[in-house]
Image (spheres, coloured by chain):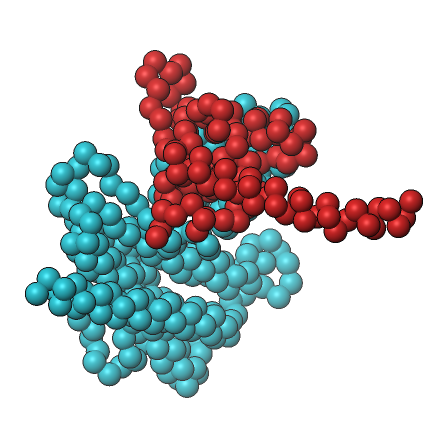
Amino acid sequence: MKSRSLYAFLLRLHPPRFRDKYEDQMLWIFDESVQSRGVVSLLFDALVSLVRQWVFRSGGRRSKLPSSAIDGVSVLAESLHQNSQKLFLRAWRVNVLWLLWAVVVLLLCPMPIFGKLQFVFYSLLTLSLISGRKPVRGWPPRLHYISLFYYKVSREFYRAEIESRRDGLRTWVGKTNEVRGAGSIVVIFLILMLLWMARPVLRGYMGLPNAGLDWDHSRYFVYGIVVLGVSFRLLTRVNESAAEAIQQELNAMDGGAK
Amino acid sequence: MANEPGTFLPLSPAILHILISLAGEDRHGYGIMQEVALQSDGQYKLGPGTLYDNLQRLLDQGLVSEVIRRGEEDSRRRYYRLSSLGKRVVNLEIGRLEGVFRQAKVHLRPVKAAKS
């Protein structure tokens, strides 16, 4: 049963839209075919699927609302609103995590003052990159732009409105998966880096040599997050260009209506 | 035109197999996997991840639709049906492949003769 639990766990890691729709069916196929196909083959397939769904598919799914939903637009708007609230909270959690981390480092870390300043600078830079804002200038950011994640979702509202004007019942909502995925990646990355930094402490518990806190590792942590932040910022730029294209589309539609 | 059958070609092997497996009757996911294995004498085995990824694409493109079967003993089973657009796409792809085979035969025949 361990292999089934592992398979179920891999399915749970899939993007919500894919998971909600196919998790039960894939588990059922696992139950039916595990004897004939072998556990390794199915687990490998699930692993490949996991990467495929997050990396290649999560942003590009076109969602079709039920054809019976006459008021589909309002249903969609409500659902997007709920999703955005969740994402907003998640984004805030990431920001709070950052603040806690900064406080811990500044208060407890026996780094020289230059190192602390360096840390603060990179923290601010990274946080602002993730938030989609320039560092320091314009601080604090406007509430609804506090996070890249929320920014992306608010763009979905915008897009949904346009799509609803176009054909009423179709829109793009798959991006929320990408946003959730991005949030999860940040959190997972933070946790992994914290664990990595905690290695000396763990070594102490295990009675191994080279025990004790090595705060100098924190700079690598910061550098890693900066790289991640820049990647997210680049992603935002892609979305900004998409938003521009949508704006042009909207203008053209308005022109056509006149 | 987004729904022009020609715009979907050429089909990937996985999608071609899935569409052909649905040409005869509606099938659930596991049924599709079994049918594909049968069609290819066990040489082509679809995994559930690949299957549902491609099914999702086919549903989005309108080549396949989901069918609700009442009274089904296992609620986890969902059935899929080839749409009329899907049928046209498969026919077109088979026609295209026949052309490829014809060309291949024309070009490969002299090589065979030369060898013998």
Image point 13% across, 38% down: which residue? A70
In the image, residue A100 sits, relative to residue B40, either above or below, namely below
* Chain A visual colour: cyan
Q: Residue furthest bottom?
A: A114
Residue at 83% from the left image edge and 50% from the top image edge: B111
Which residue does the image show at 27% across and 81% down from the upper left? A136
Left or right? Give the position of A50 relative to A93: right
Give the red chain's letter.
B
Q: Quadrant of the N terminus of chain A?
A: top right
Asked which quadrant contains residue B56, the reply is top left
- How many numbered marks are there? 0
A131 to A82, vertically: above or below: below
- Is residue A26 among the parts visible in the rendering? yes
Residue A95 at x, y = what percent?
29, 64
Q: Quadrant of residue A124?
A: bottom left
- Let me know if residue A1 appears in the view: no
Q: Position of residue B68 (x, y in %)?
A: 33, 24
* In front of the other: A1 or B98: B98
Q: Is residue B91 left or right of residue A258?
A: right
- Give coordinates of residue A161: x percent, y percent: 17, 56
Left or right position of A227 against A137: right
Q: From the top left corner, tell me how far across and down residue A239 is, in percent.
A: 32, 66
